[in-house]
Image (cartoon, grey):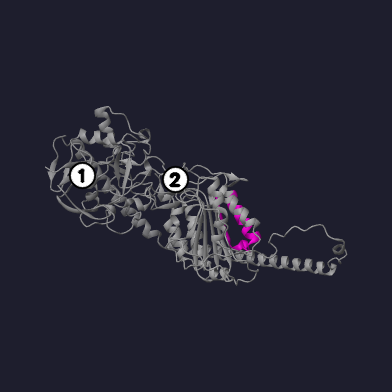
Amino acid sequence: MRRALVVPLLAVTLLCATSALAEKPQRDLAVIPKVPAGSVSIGGEYWALIIGIDKYQHAPSLDSAVKDATAVREVLVARYGFNRRHVIELLDQQATGPNIKDALYRLTQETGPEDSVFIYYAGHGQYDKAGRLGWWVPVEGKPQSPGTFIENAAIRDYIEGMQAKHVYLVADSCFSGTLFGKARAMPPLNDKFFANLYANKSRWGLTSGGTEPVADSGKGGHSIFAYHLLKLLKENSEPYLVPSYIYGQIAPIIANNAEQTPRSEPLKNTGDEGGQFVFRLSAGAATKPKTSAPSAQMSEAPAPSAALSQAEKEIKTIEAQAQQAEEQKRLAAIEQKKQQLQAEQELKALEAQERQAEEQQKLAAVQKQIEEKKKQMERKKQDVIEEARVRPPSAPGQTGREITGKDGAPMLLVPEGEFLYGDDNQRMTLPAFYMDKYELTTARYAKFLQETGRATPGKWNEASLVSDGDRPVIGVTWHDADAYCRQYGKRLPTEQEWEKAARGTDGRKYPWGNEEPTSRYAKYDLDGKASWNGYATLATVESYESGRSPYGMYHMAGNVWEWTSSDYDSSNKVLRGGSWFNYAFNLRSTVRLWYNPTSWLNYVLLGFRCAQDAR
């Protein structure tokens, strides 16, 4: 369940399954006007972003995506005038989510208003059951974790932000059809056809399928979609190509030979103004017709001038030398930049050392104050532990808004009244109840195991009650959590009670307010590098005081997901709160996650706290 566990979320799987046959496009002959090369004035530069992923870190591997991507790159450079310096290529482990987004952002910054951008993606794709959301899956993407994917909406936002006149997106992945808007008519078929298409801004897409799975295998080591696209690009002899013609040539063949139907339409909400991307065949790249054996008269024609041939060689040599000089100049500039950065870093290091020396005495005094504060906190903590140990296990003792449960855990009052519930802020009223101030600790759960003889939870052998006794217990099933609460006259909270305890009555986004999460407020995956390193991965239950809810509960966002008593459906229970393994998106107080009550598969993520009725 890595990162964005989309809510509500179907069980996401990256493997493409069989799908009902879509209606196949007709194999009508596409009519395109014949115009001479050079008749369309195309300005600006051609740019390309090429993405291909076979070796996924967590999802099933593919066989042909990288080969497809590199073949597309080569044909663009060899036949359609793309400069390699303007081709961004991300293959396998390079194709992380941040790298893909950085590349898209680079295209918004470096392309000009007359440029044309071609984007090719070959890899896994996914969409939700309702068909409203679609994603690309980067190399580190995890099943059941759409937060590790790249949303189609984000891709469209980057495309909309590009200054380029034309953007053509080709996606060979499952469920890529969610990118599209409405189709539109073509301009009149006349000698101005290509010029009219090029004149207007365009944001156009071609996908290997709609919202159905697509095949990874096909012909010649390529997917069936990539094979026919490459075949057309390699064999084309016309001076200009547009997306509508490409689709008309390859879509019927693919639809009739595979259980997928390509789509080619404008991309919705990206600034399309009616034009189309125009591929321009490079000079000399057109397929030359075969000639018959030379006649006697032709054989008598004089051979090309040796001097002309020598001049051509010299021109090529000069061009090669010029390119080499340009490359050397570029490398020299890079080296100079490196040296400058190194000098700046050394200067900063010296300045830091100077500041450190100046503050040495101040730091010593501060350190002494910190140590004294730690000792005070430890003495206070021991007093609380001793008080819990000697308190008799009778009915909770009322002390204003805070009581102590039969298990010795402090509980806070959530008063009766109305609050705002869910993403749509539905008004709801609940009676008063108490909820544990902290997540249930390993120390309290160890006492429960000793009293009941219940089986230990997952990862229990990694816990040390000396060093981990004040960290939340993990690896518990729903039934484990329910049994604990009942043992001490409590119960699991409903998800409505849990949300009110987390949000209060003002409809805030997070327990501490509407400010976005930082390391000051919660334990979560701040930088995308979170991994399990034993119980020390978890925060102690009394930490992150700044992240408390309006009623004073700790860790209502992050640290561990918490079981509730509410049913998600007939076979699953609702979890709330996010965990140390999730991005900030899942820390919102309205986020809901479902899980099987008998399962402990993600045992390092699941914990709980108890509630009880106010008497």
- Residue 54 seen by the camera: no
Q: Nearer the viewer, residue 61 or 248?
A: 248
Disc 1 on helix, strand or loop? strand
- Residue 169, labelled with which disc? none
- Residue 435, labelled with which disc? 1
Residue 269 included in the magenta stretch of the image:
no
Query: Quarter of the image holding residue 243?
Result: bottom right
Of label 1 and label 2, which has the lower sequence position? 2
**200 to the left or right of 594:** right
Q: Nearer the viewer, residue 147 or 374?
A: 147
**2 to the left or right of 193:** left
The crowd level at tag 1 (other Cα within 10 Å; few <14, some 14-19, many 20+) is many
Q: Nearer the viewer, mark 1 or mark 2?
A: 2
Residue 76 included in the magenta stretch of the image:
yes
Q: Nearer the viewer, residue 51 or 304?
A: 304
Give amino acid for label 1: Met
Q: CA distance from mark 1 to mark 2?
A: 34 Å
What residue is rendered at 25% in x and 35% in y? 482
What is the quadrant of the N terminus in the image?
A: top left
Magenta range: 67-91
What residue is rendered at 32% in x and 31% in y? 456
Residue tagged 2: 142
Q: Position of residue 517 (x, y in %)?
A: 34, 55
- Residue 590 seen by the camera: yes
Disc 2 on helix, strand or loop? loop
State whether the magenta stretch is mostly helix, strand or loop.
Answer: helix
Give amino acid for label 2: Lys
Q: Nearer the viewer, residue 486 or 315?
A: 315
Q: Position of residue 8 (x, y in %)?
A: 33, 48
